[in-house]
Amino acid sequence: MGKKYKVVFDREVCIGALACNAVAPEVWKTADDGKVDLIGGTKRDDGKWELVIDEEQLGKNKEAADSCPVYAIVIEEVEE
Ligand code: SF4
């Protein structure tokens, strides 16, 4: 079994630059307010959104995280 990762998205700091949507539209969807939504994500108590992904989805999401100008996307490794 491959490793699992967590995409953590701070929607508060997102400025709607849409770089994430350009590299991974299957995960980052444009929203009516000009920001993006993390498709399939769940909202945490701290207001951030998170989505568990597997290794196959890591590359694209890393690219999305790296492309975000305000560092709204963070990828963490999930401890098994
Ligand atoms: S790249 Fe960052 S700022 Fe731009 S839409 Fe995605 S999360 Fe928001």
Image (cartoon, rainbow, N blue to C red):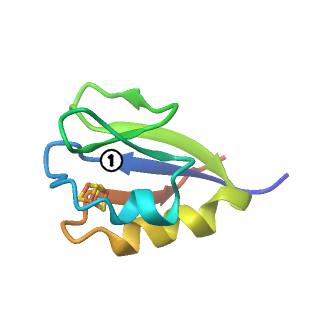
Is residue 60 depicted above or below 10 in this figure?
below
Q: Within 8 Å: ligand 1 and the Cβ of disc 1?
A: yes
Q: In which quadrant of the rendered view does residue 52 lie?
A: top right
Residue at disc 1, secondary structure: strand
Q: Residue furthest right?
A: 1
Which sits in the foreground, 31 or 76? 31
Identify which residue is drawn at 14% across, 43% down.
12
State the image coordinates of residue 19 (x, y, percent, origin top left): 35, 66
Q: Is residue 18 left or right of residue 15?
A: right
Residue ID at (21%, 32%)? 46
Disc 1 residue type (three-letter): Phe
Q: Is residue 35 left or right of residue 21?
A: left
For mark 1, what is the residue?
9
Q: Is residue 42 above or below residue 35?
A: above
For the image shown, how many numbered marks are present on the structure?
1
Left or right of 16, for residue 59? right
**Residue 62 against residue 27 in the figure, above or below:** below
From this view, report whether residue 27 is shown above or below residue 42: below
Residue 25 spot, x, y in % from top left: 51, 52
Residue occupying image coordinates x 21% and y 54%: 16
Residue 77 screen position, x and y as percent: 54, 58
Question: 8 or 1, which is in the foreground?
Answer: 8
> Which quadrant of the figure shows ligand 1?
bottom left
Graded by Cα atoms within 10 Å as few (under 14), some (14 to 19) or many (20 or more), the crowding at tag 1 reads many
- The residue sitting at 79% across, 56% down in the picture is 2
What percent of the width, then of the height, locates residue 69?
22, 71
